[in-house]
Image: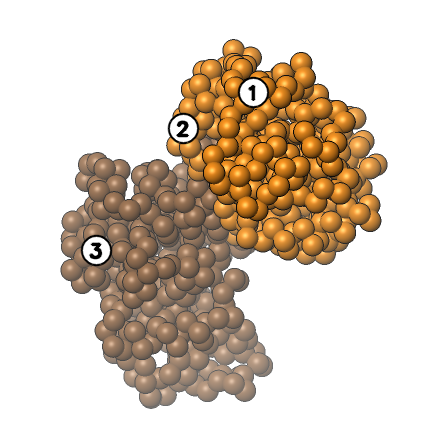
Chain colours: A brown, B orange
Amino acid sequence: MNQSTHVNRQITLAARPNGAPTPNDFKLVESPVPTPSSGEILLRTLYLSLDPYMRGRMSDAKSYADPVGIGEVMVGGSICRVEVSNHADYVQGDLVVAFGGWQDYSVSDGVGVIKLDKAMPNPSYGLGVLGMPGLTAYMGLLDIGAPQVGETVVVAAATGAVGSLVGQIAKLKGCTVVGIAGGQEKCDYAVNELGFDACIDHRSTGLEEQLAQACPAGIDIYYENVGGKVFDAVLPLLNTKARVPLCGLISQYNATALPAGPDRIGLLMGNILVKRIKMQGFIVFDDYGHRYSEFQEAMVPWLMSGQIKYKEDKVLGLENAVSSFIGLLQGDNFGKLVVQVGPEQIDFGAKS
Amino acid sequence: MNQSTHVNRQITLAARPNGAPTPNDFKLVESPVPTPSSGEILLRTLYLSLDPYMRGRMSDAKSYADPVGIGEVMVGGSICRVEVSNHADYVQGDLVVAFGGWQDYSVSDGVGVIKLDKAMPNPSYGLGVLGMPGLTAYMGLLDIGAPQVGETVVVAAATGAVGSLVGQIAKLKGCTVVGIAGGQEKCDYAVNELGFDACIDHRSTGLEEQLAQACPAGIDIYYENVGGKVFDAVLPLLNTKARVPLCGLISQYNATALPAGPDRIGLLMGNILVKRIKMQGFIVFDDYGHRYSEFQEAMVPWLMSGQIKYKEDKVLGLENAVSSFIGLLQGDNFGKLVVQVGPEQIDFGAKS
């Protein structure tokens, strides 16, 4: 199903999921292409980013951002082309990073919209290594984690958008890096392509023993993006003065109730006390948005020189966003998940 | 039972407690007064500090410090008088802060020993407001908590050695301060004498509702020294970007097993993530010992001017250390608990 110039396909939230989202929690609707008012731009979505945090927006539990309302378009970062501009800062054909959501067209007043260089070879990288996941990896690791040469860094979802960058940046900073990923293929990729020192398949048996073996000097930084049984295996290995940047907890996003006891809230706090651990949550754009240029100055050369490798899991067609997102929460993706919403060949120079 | 010049009364660890310590876990023994070798000093204990962390030393669970061995003298900070000096830096009659333990006499090579001004009006303050508890309150609040004018600070054990100082320093920094303490008498003292804005009796009913009412703008800093049901009441009130310096968890020191479920380890981590909380444990001398003079320069004037008030709970006689320590873990003390081990009238100028 191709992008049309006169219909706006939109994926809306049909129901709040109870546990893992199902296709019935979403609805594909067709609307007219919106018309930008004065001071606004019409954006056509070329690429849509799918990220675990979107699961949080589907729930109405109190969180750092408002939930998506029932019947509203699912939110999400996107790479878009300016189709119509009534805004002084934009002209038709401009390529931008925006928060256009799960739809073909959106209207923006320019707030939060970032222009991209049209000569950029891979515009979709603006949703990953050069965008929110990249900044998340960079700031969480360097600002909260503060890695020192020779320290041991552990990161889960090791081939995902964030984890793959955390591990590679930690290697560049002189750390020993141990990844955790789902399946042997991902683990091989983390070690052979990304240069991790080791990677453990959490689907195999003996995660705790394997992790202890891979971290003979304990763990100095655990970049947390999954929680659950991975954290359980990490906790006893954390060293004195360990740092735990808390970026995500994908393993519990679909949970409908707290797990059975015993209650380990005091056990965790006891460990934080006795080992003098720092655990700190962060939301990347709120906490670090003002340091984007510092990140970009480091990351672009790393990427150009091949010191940082980046893998995309590119899905074709907005109609496949729902199944891809459901799979993302189960770890089905291999690399940064993006949906190509616009046409295969994008003529960035021509008028629409 | 008075201090003798020829017998060294020692309180040793007789057994590792199962739950709350009982008198049978300790043993009072008499030994000869030790003889200092070359480079050593003989110390006579005048005051012994009793602190909650000592409960940890009675267990053999892995911690930041080695446990006390069975049959060994219980450890503890003390104010001592130098009785014999074979060390170039000390003369007989010097007053020092040392780590002499639960006994009348100890020998030291001077490492970790700090000389006190003999003109100091209350030498036992070196175990409290001007010593380890003072530095703990000051650094945990200011360095990890980083209070800003107008923020809300909550501290439990509000009339204890650390809590009373945390609250008063927070008031000096322009914060709203809410204490939690056991009993109306302590709460009245926190508000009327220490200047807290409110203080809640955790023995009364409705802790959660009372705390919510006392903190209408939420909690920005929770200085944690108790854990348990107090933390449960605090957690939902923590604001975005709240800081939780983790100093102690007295409510769980006597626990023999984890509490019943559900398991809230993920709930806590979810809160840290979504609210971008920083929770950080610290051990005061390891992390902040090098900043003692900075602390002293602030605290001495506060104390002299009456801006900081300090209350001691002084117990007479080493033989009462055990029952006082057991009471400390139940919150029986009112103010900083110290045991006067030496004579009531100490002639700091005369030779022994």
Q: Which disc number belongs to residue B61?
A: 2
Q: Position of residue B236 (x, y in %)?
A: 59, 40
Q: Measured along the vertical axis of the image, is residue A179 above or below residue B40? A: below
Q: Measured along the vertical axis of the image, is residue B155 above or below residue B298? A: above
Q: Is residue A11 visible?
A: no
Rendered image quadrant of residue A8: bottom left
Check disc 1 and report the residue beneath it. Answer: B8
Q: Position of residue A72 (x, y in %)?
A: 49, 57
- The amino acid type of the residue labelled 2 equals Ala
**Residue at left offset 50%, top offset 68%:** A289
Check disc 3 and report the residue beneath it. Answer: A197
Are the residues flagged by discs 1 and 2 from a single subunit? Answer: yes
Looking at the rendered structure, the secondary structure element under dot 2 is: loop
State which tag comes first along the sequence, 1 or 2.
Answer: 1
* Chain letter of the residue beneath label 3 in the structure image: A
Q: Residues within 10 Å of mark 1 (few under 14, many from 20)?
A: some
